[in-house]
């Protein structure tokens, strides 16, 4: 039997096959097509994955054709195709545990129910589904690894819900009986059967654990102060959102445990952790079910997580933005695999219009994963496939795989030499539904600004700050850490308020806690006195919010090309500093400001003896300001051209938006070797200039090429 496992090796979670480190690069296709498998085999790729998608649904049923009835004929034929095409192949199928259609006919009461009464999909709280689908999965795993070609299996990817472990969110879930029963039991656990505490936190005297109901659409759309609900007096909706995520993670881990119950010699993983992408869409941050990432990361039953990269601005000149905090996944010893599902120029929906643009996007996407020390699979799609049926693309993939394989012998640990972006998974629970705040705060901030800062950007949940293995950074940017408990605030203070570090706090850090709204909690974090103003107009409790720069003599603002920034979406309440000891760099521009003539400091800095605190009261901070803050904090900036830059101690990649000569500054003296052209660009330098074309990717090795061994 083939043994596959994930070990920390070279400072990063690494795939091991039969006790040897193995490059984590694979080819996905919905159904195996021998010709395409052979093409990847010849390119040096021997790991393959396949299975259910929105286009190909035949494998969705786990070979489960009726009650206690299974037919593995089609599955075995697919496995045979891989083995016949590549005798050295390793495979890990994508297995969907959502039940087949006949199952719904037998169990209509186990289905998810939307707010309008419509049913779709299985309730992820269904115990009957877990039991029966778990048995079908158990039988299929045993059949696979004990079959004729069992030695070719290295693991399994489990999908559920809407394929990528999304809860059903076409409307508002889940008003089913299984969800209600499970929610009531979950509440008993959270509140330790203390009904008085439940009533206090929910702000209702007429409920107990046996009478509570699923929060309505109206409740989910409501707020107490601006966009926020009070966690201390109006916790019903937040509790339900937390329950949705935890029940999703619980279901995912249940099926992973089923696999581990059959075999500990194979890896198992799933799509999960889409906290960054979800902020760009209404309902998703609260209803997708991906906010229990810590529960998943701390489980020994799962080995890898995965996701496609962002679908926004991913074309030529764009970014392969992360959907999940990948550095957090890496910190907790799980392998991350990116699904590279970029449409080629030859495809009707391709963003790349030429072969060269397709090649440069593949270089960009590979370089990002290489620099982070994670893996990927190249995805083919639709029944006919053929996205990679091009000799130039296949030659490039062969070259990229060799680079990745060579990198396994290098130190791939995260060094803390860039910017640490900190997010919170629970804050969305306390917001009314919508994207007014979270989209400009997280989604737009990362895609349009932070990724173009010119240095490495690492993304974590704030829980990482309590992990001793997290590297120390010079700069921490807290994007949406609004809900923090007293214990969590202390962890953050202990990590960042020392050693000359700089912290950037956006909008209202720590304003929400288990005790409700708190400006004192914000003061604990930022070291500044911060107040707030409730927005009250005829129609809204929120307003567009901007900052205008008023001080251009500080290093953060001295060379700015912008004077005003913020969001045109309605956000609220309005936060501003009251502290006379801060230096004010900018003031708020809001509708009520124009009416009353008040000026509220919204962009401020305070320098303590051993750390520096920057407060910015609006989302969507421009890249120029972020870069200046990073430089002020002592972070090394490689480039100031607003190109995409990926870097670690050995590799540096640049993906350009505009052509021209680019000056790259290095943190120390080294040789610069262009990996793709196999030439030295410069030797023993700490700065070099190269000419780069429009939408081009250049990948450099920093050091002697003999170290890489290519």
Image (cartoon, grey):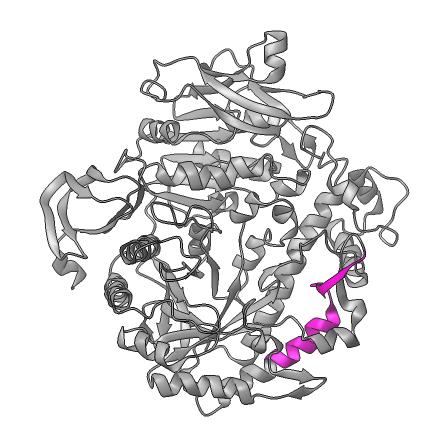
For residue 131: magenta?
yes
Question: Which residue appears farthest toward the top when viewing the image?
Answer: 597
Rendered location of residue 610, percent (x, y) = 38, 26
Q: Quadrant of residue 685?
A: top left
Taking depth in this image into account, of 55 and 633 the one nearest to the observer is: 55
Question: Which residue appears farthest toward the left when viewing the image?
Answer: 683
Quarter holding the N terminus is bottom left
For residue 72: magenta?
no
Question: Which residue appears farthest toward the right when viewing the image?
Answer: 206
- Residue 395 in the image: above or below residue 446: below
Taking depth in this image into account, of 56 and 422 the one nearest to the observer is: 56
Rendered location of residue 644, percent (x, y) = 32, 43
- Residue 223 in the image: above or below residue 458: above
Taking depth in this image into account, of 160 and 40 the one nearest to the observer is: 40
In this rendering, does residue 122 appear at all? no
Quarter holding the C terminus is bottom left
Rendered location of residue 569, percent (x, y) = 58, 30
Q: Going 38% across and 63% down the picture, which residue do you hit?
A: 376
Q: Quadrant of residue 197?
A: top right
Question: Which residue appears farthest toward the front when viewing the image?
Answer: 348
* Left or right, 534 with reference to 159: right
Task: Read off the magenta span.
Answer: 117-137
Rendered location of residue 495, percent (x, y) = 45, 37
In this rendering, does residue 65 appear at all? yes
* Left or right, 294 with reference to 241: left
């Amino acid at each position: 039997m083939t043994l596959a496992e994930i070990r920390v090796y070279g400072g990063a979670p690494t795939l091991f096959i039969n006790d040897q480190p193995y490059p984590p690069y694979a080819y996905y296709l919905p159904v195996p097509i021998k010709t395409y498998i052979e093409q990847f085999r010849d390119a040096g790729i021997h790991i393959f994955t396949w299975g259910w998608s929105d286009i190909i649904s035949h494998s969705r049923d786990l070979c489960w054709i009726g009650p206690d009835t299974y037919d593995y004929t089609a599955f075995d034929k697919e496995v045979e195709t891989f083995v016949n095409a590549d005798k050295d192949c390793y495979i890990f199928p994508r297995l969907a545990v959502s039940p087949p259609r006949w199952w719904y006919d037998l169990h209509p009461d186990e289905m998810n129910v939307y707010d309008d009464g419509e049913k779709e999909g299985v309730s992820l709280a269904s115990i009957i589904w877990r039991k029966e689908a778990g048995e079908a999965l158990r039988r299929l795993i045993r059949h696979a690894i004990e079959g004729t070609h069992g030695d070719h299996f290295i693991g399994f990817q489990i999908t559920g819900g809407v394929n990528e472990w999304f809860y059903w969110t076409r409307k508002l879930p889940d008003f089913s009986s299984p969800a209600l029963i499970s929610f009531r039991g979950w509440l008993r656990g959270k509140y330790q059967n203390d009904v008085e505490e439940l009533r206090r936190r929910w702000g209702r005297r007429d409920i107990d654990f046996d009478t509570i109901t699923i929060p309505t659409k109206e409740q989910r759309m409501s707020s107490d102060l601006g966009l926020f609900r009070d966690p201390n007096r109006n916790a019903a909706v937040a509790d339900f959102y937390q329950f949705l995520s935890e029940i999703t993670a619980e279901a995912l881990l249940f099926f992973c445990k089923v696999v581990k119950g059959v075999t500990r010699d194979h890896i198992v993983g799933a799509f999960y952790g889409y906290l960054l992408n979800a902020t760009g869409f209404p309902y998703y941050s609260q209803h997708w079910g991906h906010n229990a990432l810590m529960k998943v990361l701390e489980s020994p039953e799962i080995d890898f997580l995965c996701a496609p990269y962002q679908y926004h601005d991913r074309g030529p000149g764009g970014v392969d933005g992360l959907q999940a905090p990948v550095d957090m996944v890496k910190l907790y010893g799980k392998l991350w695999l990116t699904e590279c599902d970029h449409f080629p120029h030859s495809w009707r929906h391709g963003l790349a219009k030429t072969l060269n643009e397709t090649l440069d996007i593949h270089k960009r996407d590979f370089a990002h994963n290489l620099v982070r020390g994670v893996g990927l699979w190249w995805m083919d799609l639709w029944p006919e496939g053929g996205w990679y049926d091009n000799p130039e693309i296949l030659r490039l993939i062969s070259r990229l795989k060799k680079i990745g394989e060579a990198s396994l012998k290098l130190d791939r640990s995260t060094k803390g030499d860039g910017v640490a972006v900190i997010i919170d998974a629970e804050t969305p629970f306390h917001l009314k539904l919508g994207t007014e705040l979270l989209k400009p705060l997280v989604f737009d901030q990362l895609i349009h600004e932070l990724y173009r800062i010119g240095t490495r950007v690492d993304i974590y949940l704030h829980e990482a700050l309590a992990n001793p293995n997290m590297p120390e950074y010079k700069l921490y940017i807290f994007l949406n850490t609004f809900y923090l408990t007293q214990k969590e605030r202390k962890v953050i203070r202990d990590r960042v308020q020392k050693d000359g570090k700089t912290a950037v706090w956006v909008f209202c850090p720590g304003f929400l806690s288990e005790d409700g709204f708190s400006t004192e909690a914000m003061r604990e974090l930022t070291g500044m006195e911060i107040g707030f103003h409730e927005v009250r107009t005829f129609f809204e409790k929120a307003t567009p919010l901007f900052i205008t720069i008023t001080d251009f003599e500080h290093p953060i603002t001295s060379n700015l090309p912008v004077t005003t920034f913020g969001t045109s979406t309605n956000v609220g309440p309005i936060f501003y500093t009251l502290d006379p000891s801060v230096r004010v760099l900018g003031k708020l521009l809001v509708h009520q400001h124009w009416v009353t003539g008040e000026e509220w400091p919204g962009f401020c800095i305070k320098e303590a003896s051993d750390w520096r605190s920057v407060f910015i009261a609006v989302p969507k901070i421009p890249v120029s300001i972020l870069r200046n803050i990073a430089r002020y904090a002592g972070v090394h900036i490689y480039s100031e051209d607003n190109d995409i830059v990926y870097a670690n101690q050995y590799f540096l990649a640049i993906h350009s938006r505009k052509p021209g000569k680019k000056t790259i500054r290095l943190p120390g003296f080294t040789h610069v070797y262009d990996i793709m052209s196999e030439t030295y660009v410069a030797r023993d330098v700490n700065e070099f200039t190269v000419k780069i074309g429009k939408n081009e990717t250049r990948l450099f090795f920093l050091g002697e090429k003999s170290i890489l061994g290519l």
